[in-house]
Image (spheres, rainbow, N blue to C red):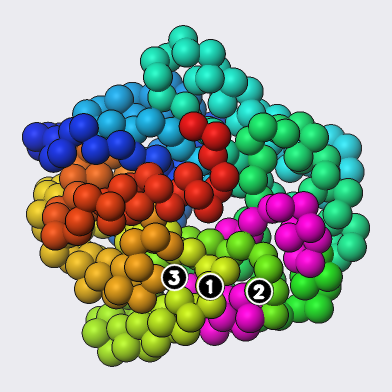
């Protein structure tokens, strides 16, 4: 039985300041008993962490590393139950802005969790998205920093299922781009999440909108499951070429993480014996090194992606793995990777 909390490690470089630029909060129905789920399954992962609220976040943030602040990423959480459908995501911004205010009160220590918020506005609304962007900003004027539209897609529906129906090239849709053009005038950034075969779509988007800050989530999500099982080495040069093409766009930054999700197909996912930080660093090293070489530390930021990455390790082990991977970096490079890039890209007042 997978128990990530069972692995305890000494904290490496405990004084190093960390800004975690990617985590979620949610409270979803508890899993119901049923037939066993495949190991590499988002549904199995959802069973593991169906509830992750401020108390669990605080426990992770205080598990040994020097986390000074975080950025919240939209997760279809706490949407309003009624009202216009396109405006229901305002509930998520209101919810997490309140949690950010809790941490800003100082009542939970010096950590400024949710110093920034990346929410959800459906940019497929075109010009109609502009008013919703303003509405989100109005509800969290000190924290709202941008939006994310997730479009992971593959012809093999076993990888992600039917939940995402935008199709293969959603970021190229003229209606999406009509909505996207309203971000830069408002000083808002865009987080992109999709799969490695779709990365050329982000390259094209970044070139078409050079004045909009784009952040690629999860190192571009290399695939190693479903139709891509056993093909990571074959796909690596393709992924690497796309990462290098994105790095040539000065308006793009990258989050180095998310490799603990099931999509990559690493043996460490949901393993009965949780992987050590040393093992994780060895597995992830080719991807992490490629990202940093392509973008430089000043456009890279390590991310936790919690609680999603709980499917591979606990929070303390995850940051130990990143610290192992950055062991050869200079002091300035470590500052950028662990806090500086996130502060700058998300305009955090901390």
Q: Give how far across and how far down residue 163 sits, in percent.
A: 61, 62
SS for dot 1: loop
| Circle 3 crowding by C-alpha within 10 Å: few under 14, some 14–19, many from 20 | many
Provide residue 83's location: percent of width, then percent of height: 88, 37
Q: Please report whichever mark, 3 or 2, sits nearer to the chain's N-terminal start.
A: 2
Residue drawn at (68%, 68%) of the image: 211
Work out whether 267 lies above or below 199: above
Residue for badge 2: 210
Residue at the extreme top? 107
Residue 191 lies within the magenta run = yes
Q: Is residue 55 depicted above or below 312 in this figure?
A: above
Give the Cα distance between marks 3 and 1.
17 Å
Query: Seen in the image, is 176 located left or right of residue 334?
Result: right
Q: Which mark is drawn over residue 47?
A: none
Label 3 belongs to which residue?
A: 220
Q: Is residue 173 left or right of residue 204?
A: right
Image marks 3 and 2: residues in contact by CB distance under 8 Å: no
Give the camera-side residue of 232 and 252.
252
What residue did someone put label 1 on?
250
Q: Please state the horizontal and vertical placement of residue 190, each as a whole percent of the image.
A: 63, 59
* Magenta stretch, residue numbers: 180-207
Asked whether residue 22 is drawn in magenta, I would say no
Where 196 sits versus 335, above or below?
below
Write down the quadrant of residue 115 in the picture. top right
Q: Is 34 or 270 nearer to us in this picture?
A: 270
Label 3 to label 2: alpha-carbon separation: 19 Å
């Amino acid at each position: 039985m997978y128990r990530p909390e069972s692995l305890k490690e000494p904290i490496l470089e405990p004084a190093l300041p960390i800004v975690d630029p990617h985590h979620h909060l949610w409270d979803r129905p508890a899993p119901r008993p049923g037939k066993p789920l495949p190991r590499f399954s988002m549904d199995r992962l959802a069973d593991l962490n169906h509830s992750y609220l401020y108390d669990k976040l605080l426990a992770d943030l205080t598990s040994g590393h020097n986390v000074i602040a975080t950025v919240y990423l939209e997760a279809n959480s706490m949407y309003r139950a009624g009202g216009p459908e396109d405006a229901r995501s305002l509930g998520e911004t209101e919810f997490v802005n309140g949690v950010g205010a809790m941490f800003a009160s100082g009542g939970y220590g010096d950590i400024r969790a949710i110093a920034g918020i990346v929410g959800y506005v459906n940019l497929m609304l075109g010009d109609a998205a502009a008013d919703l962007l303003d509405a989100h900003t109005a509800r969290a004027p000190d924290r709202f920093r941008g939006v994310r539209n997730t479009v992971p897609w593959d012809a093999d529906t076993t990888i992600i299922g039917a939940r995402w129906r935008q199709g293969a090239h959603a970021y190229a849709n003229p209606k999406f781009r009509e909505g996207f053009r309203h971000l830069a005038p408002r000083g808002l950034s865009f987080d992109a999440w999709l799969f490695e075969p779709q990365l050329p779509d982000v390259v094209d988007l970044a070139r078409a909108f050079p004045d909009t800050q784009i952040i690629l989530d999860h190192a571009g999500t290399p695939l190693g499951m479903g139709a891509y099982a056993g093909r990571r080495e074959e796909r690596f040069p393709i992924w690497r070429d796309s990462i290098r093409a994105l790095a040539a766009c000065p308006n793009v930054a990258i989050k180095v993480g998310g490799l603990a999700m099931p999509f990559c197909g690493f043996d460490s996912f949901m393993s009965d014996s949780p992987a050590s930080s040393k093992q994780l660093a060895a597995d992830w090293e080719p991807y992490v090194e490629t990202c940093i070489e392509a973008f430089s530390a000043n456009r890279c930021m390590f991310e936790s992606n919690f609680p999603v990455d709980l499917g591979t390790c606990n929070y303390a082990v995850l940051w130990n793995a990143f610290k192992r991977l950055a062991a050869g970096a200079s002091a300035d490079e470590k500052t950028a990777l662990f806090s500086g890039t996130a502060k700058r890209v998300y305009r955090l007042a901390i």
